[in-house]
Amino acid sequence: MKLNELRDNPGASKGRKRIGRGPGSGKGKTGGRGIKGQKSRSGVAINGYEGGQMPLYQRLPKRGFNSRNRKKFAVINLGLIQKFIDAKKLDPKQEITEDVLVESGLVRRKLDGVRVLAKGELTAKVTLSVTGASKSAIAAVEKAGGTLTVTSPAAGE
């Protein structure tokens, strides 16, 4: 077999229908668009238009509010910290800061800070220093014999 002999399996590809190419094509003259009207013209995109009736997206009530200056935290769970300690990617004897978490690969980027949540089991005695933590996470770290300090985000960020 040579490169010029390569072919698709029969029936694997189908040629596109050429529209508006005479009556014999089956899609001639109006090209399957019917007669007259907005949809028969070119350059018309009517998404969400319901013929003058109030569209669904306008009939439904507005909900919620998004603050423009909300903080976005990188979230990690205690179970993941323990997993990384077991895998020797984190050293429990040294203080674990946000920069250490980024270097180990546990957190991709700090965003507005790192927040620790209490999902999972922590057995190692660790010293954590992060921007935020849930009350149950602080309790779980202290129960394991470690400390968790919550720092305020740096002024430059």
Image: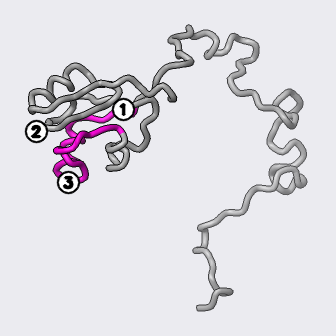
- Mark 2 or mark 1: name the one nearer the start of the chain: 1
Q: Which three-letter amino acid code belongs to the residue tagged 1? A: Val
Residue 124 percent location from the top left of the image: 12, 40
**40 or 46: nearer the viewer:** 46
Answer yes or no: do the residues labelled 3 and 2 have beta carbons within 8 Å?
A: no
**93 or 83: nearer the viewer:** 93
Q: Which three-letter amino acid code belongs to the residue tagged 3? A: Ala
Give the residue at mark 3: 87
Quarter of the rendering containing residue 130: top left
Quadrant into which the N terminus falls: bottom right
Q: Which residues are magenta?
A: 74-98
Give the residue at mark 2: 123
Give the residue at mark 1: 114
Element marked by disc 1: strand
**91 or 32: nearer the viewer:** 91
Residue at 36% from the left image edge and 49% from the top image edge: 103
